[in-house]
Amino acid sequence: MNMAISEQSYKELKEYWDYQRKVEYNREKVYYMAEKFDGRIVTDFGSMSLSELQSMMWSKIKVSDYDNPPPGYIPENPEYRLWNEKWPPEKDWIQDGLRREDD
């Protein structure tokens, strides 16, 4: 079973956990964007699978291009959730984050 980040661990390693959550936020955004192209990307070898597309897109993202997660962001992966965060979140941060960028 995956465990959330404990309060003690977060206090001791705040910068580390904040960075890990930033990476996870960006990965979720890229994976969400890839889902919009699922079944639409075709190579000489046939249709590209969603997992291949997600991996390919994620590999192209530079650390310097990472966005900061919005306040209140809760990761899908329970390993990166804080001890006091509940799932599912009340707000769809990925969807809203993409919507803001498109405006």
Image (tube, rainbow, N blue to C red):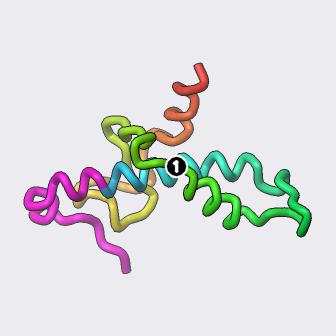
Question: Which amino acid type is shown beneath numbered disc 1?
Answer: Ile
Overall secondary structure of the magenta stretch?
Answer: helix
Q: Which residue is pictured at 24% across the width and 57% down the height?
A: 17
Where is residue 97? Give x, y as percent. 50, 34
Q: Is residue 7 rendered magenta in the image?
A: yes
Reply yes or no: does residue 29 show up in magenta. Answer: no
Position of 98 relative to 12 (above/below): above
Q: Which residues are magenta?
A: 1-19
Which residue is pictured at 62% across the width and 54% down the height? 57
Quadrant including the C terminus: top right
Q: Which residue is mark 1?
A: 61
In this view of the protein, which residue sits in the foreground, 43 or 81?
A: 43
Q: Is residue 36 left or right of residue 67?
A: right
Residue closest to the eye, 76 or 32: 32
Residue 69 image position (x, y, % from top left):
37, 41
Q: Residue at x 64, y 59 (%)?
A: 56
